[in-house]
């Protein structure tokens, strides 16, 4: 049973409407409007997230023998119109799958592969505060073009390809795609099960989100807490999941959420 919707109904009538992932207008997601609002320049919340994630991946890969003859495959689940999760994995990946449901976002991502837009340079520069980025990648546009493949797909179908990827990110997806808490949990599960044992991951969440607008359309969200984020990931993680509350440094991005959360860890060998 989904316990989330009645709880949200008491908080805000906008969120009273139950909208499952399959019911939202993903193909009409407007990447230009989304970027304009979120990623036209580097906000202080994203800067903080980049700081946490660049350290997590650098620490994980430091001292590991290069490649060991195996391909390092990354995945960004629900990539949308955000390139920075993929950029955060770039130094270590032979291939990065940008996995995305929306036709409009897939078209955007394919367009970016050949030479991404200039505003993403601020995000790359922030990653370069960690030495591995600049040392391992001399030309990020060229590395991005060579590594990235864009795949249109539904994350609920990822169970067909378990344990496939060696590093993964999922930013603002599991809690920002449905009002259903069950779908939030399943989204996290599909992401985690797609990762190979020991794979490092980073996932970002909106805390207490009541849904959001992009261009002309509104999209559903499931209001989650830090405790719920930890619980959903911990089942599939080895050891501690490191949760960093980001809050709202620099002010709120939009009405109807309580802050951002970034979670980092490693996929366990069991579950
Ligand atoms: C709030 S946006 C986040 C986009 C991006 N990851 C970011 O960090 O800004 C949610 C994204 O999840 C995608 N999405 C929604 N449902 C999905 C599904 N079932 N499978 C894959 N992607 C999905 C949407 O198309 C959208 O790009």
Image (cartoon, rainbow, N blue to C red):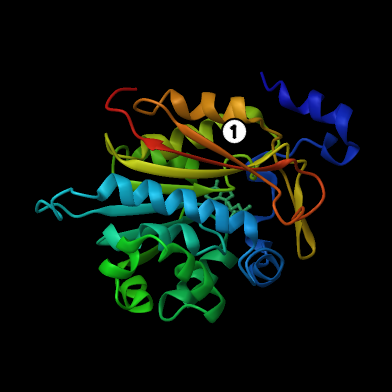
Q: Single out the residue that lies furthest toward the top.
A: 1
Kindly indicate the quadrant of the structure image that contains residue 148.
Answer: bottom left
Q: In screen coordinates, is 50 left or right of 228?
A: left
**Is ligand 1 closer than 8 angstroms to the Cβ of mark 1?**
no
Which image quadrant is residue 234 in? top left
- Up the image or down, 38 lies above or below 265; here it is below
Can residue 151 be seen? no
Quarter of the picture containing the C terminus is top left
* Residue 121 as seen in the image, left or right of residue 210: left
Quadrant position of the N terminus in the picture: top right
Report how many numbered discs are placed on residues in the image. Answer: 1
Examine the rendering and report whether any part of residue 61 can be seen: yes
- In the shown orientation, is residue 115 left or right of residue 238? right
* Viewer-proximal residue among 79 and 117: 117
SS label for mark 1 = helix
Q: Within 10 angstroms of label 1, few (less than 14), some, or many (20 or more) residues?
A: some
Residue at left offset 63%, top offset 54%? 45
User: Quick one: which residue is furthest to the left in this view?
Assistant: 69
Give x and y (percent) for residue 263: 50, 39
Q: Quadrant of residue 262?
A: top right
Q: Is residue 43 above or below residue 233?
A: below
Q: Residue at x 61, y 66 (%)?
A: 42
Closer-to-camera residue (9/22): 9
The residue singled out by tag 1 in the image is: 183
**Residue 193's x, y, as percent?**
37, 34
Residue pictured at 59% horizontal, 34% vertical: 184
Q: Position of residue 171 (x, y in %)?
A: 54, 49
User: Going 87% across and 41% down the picture, which residue do you hit?
Assistant: 14
């Amino acid at each position: 049973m989904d316990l989330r919707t009645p709880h949200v109904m008491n908080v805000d009538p906008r969120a009273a409407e139950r909208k499952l992932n399959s019911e939202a207008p993903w193909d009409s997601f407007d990447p230009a409007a989304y970027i304009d609002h979120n990623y036209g320049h580097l906000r202080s919340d994203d800067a903080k997230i980049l700081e946490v994630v660049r350290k997590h991946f650098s620490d994980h890969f430091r001292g590991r023998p290069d490649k060991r003859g195996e391909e390092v495959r990354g995945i960004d689940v629900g990539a949308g119109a955000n390139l920075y999760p993929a950029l955060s994995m770039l130094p270590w990946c032979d291939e990065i799958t940008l996995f995305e449901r929306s036709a409009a976002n897939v078209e955007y991502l394919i367009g970016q592969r050949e030479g991404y837009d200039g505003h993403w340079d601020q995000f790359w520069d922030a990653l370069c505060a960690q030495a591995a980025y600049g040392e391992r990648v001399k030309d990020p546009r060229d590395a991005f073009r060579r590594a990235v493949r864009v795949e249109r797909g539904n994350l609920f179908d990822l169970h067909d390809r378990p344990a496939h990827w060696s590093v993964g990110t999922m930013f603002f997806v599991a809690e920002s795609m449905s009002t259903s808490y069950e779908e939030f949990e399943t989204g996290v599960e599909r992401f985690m099960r797609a990762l190979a044992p020991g794979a490092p991951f980073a996932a970002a969440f909106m805390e207490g989100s009541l849904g959001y607008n992009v261009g002309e359309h509104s999209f559903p969200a499931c209001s989650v807490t830090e405790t719920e984020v930890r619980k959903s990931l911990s089942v599939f993680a080895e050891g501690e999941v490191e949760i960093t509350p980001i809050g709202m440094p620099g002010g709120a991005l939009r009405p109807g959420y309580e802050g951002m959360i970034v979670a980092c860890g490693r996929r366990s060998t069991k579950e």
